Amino acid sequence: MANIIEAIHLLENKLQNLLSNYEFLKKENEILLQNNTALQQKLLEKQQELSDQQKEYDLLKVAKTIDGSSTNTKDTKLKINALIREIDKCIIQLQE
């Protein structure tokens, strides 16, 4: 009889340990999910910032070429031609 009672107490202790570990891991998982979400948001913000900086850099390159720098004249002419083609496409779409 004593062995059965000891086995039950041992089982209860193990069950309490399992429940305690479960609650701890559940809280830890929730914290990690929150951190993951925050990091994903930061990543999106940084990607947007990088995209904005790239656009600004491209505009500065164009402005520098127009300003008289002869190093990127070909690139600037190509960019201006591409912009003109885009504007022409927009005008055609507006006329339809």
Image (tube, helix red, strand yellow):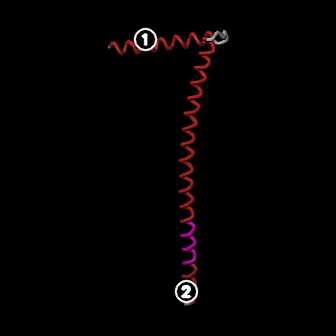
Seen as rendered, the residue at the extreme front is 67
Residue 69 figure quarter? top right
Mark sitting on residue 88: 1
Which residue is tagged 2? 5
* Amino acid of disc 1: Asp
Residue 40 rendering spot, x and y as whole percentages: 55, 43
Mark found first going from the N terminus, 2 or 1: 2
Closer-to-camera residue (5/16): 16
Q: Write the residue at 57% across / 50% down.
A: 35
Q: Write the residue at 57% across / 33% down.
A: 49
- Circle 1 packing at 10 Å, graded few (<14), some (14-19), many (20+), is few
Q: Write the residue at 61% across / 23% down.
A: 57
Marks 1 and 2: in contact by CB < 8 Å? no
Residue 17 rendering spot, x and y as whole percentages: 58, 72
Provide the secondary structure element on which disc 1 rests. helix
* Residue 53 vertical placement versus 41 (above, below): above
Q: Is residue 95 left or right of residue 11?
A: left
For the C terminus, give its image quadrant: top left
Seen as rendered, the residue at the extreme left is 96
Residue 61 rendering spot, x and y as whole percentages: 62, 18
Magenta segment: 12-21
In magenta stretch: residue 19: yes
Residue 87 figure quarter? top left
* Amino acid of disc 2: Ile
Provide the secondary structure element on which disc 2 rests. helix
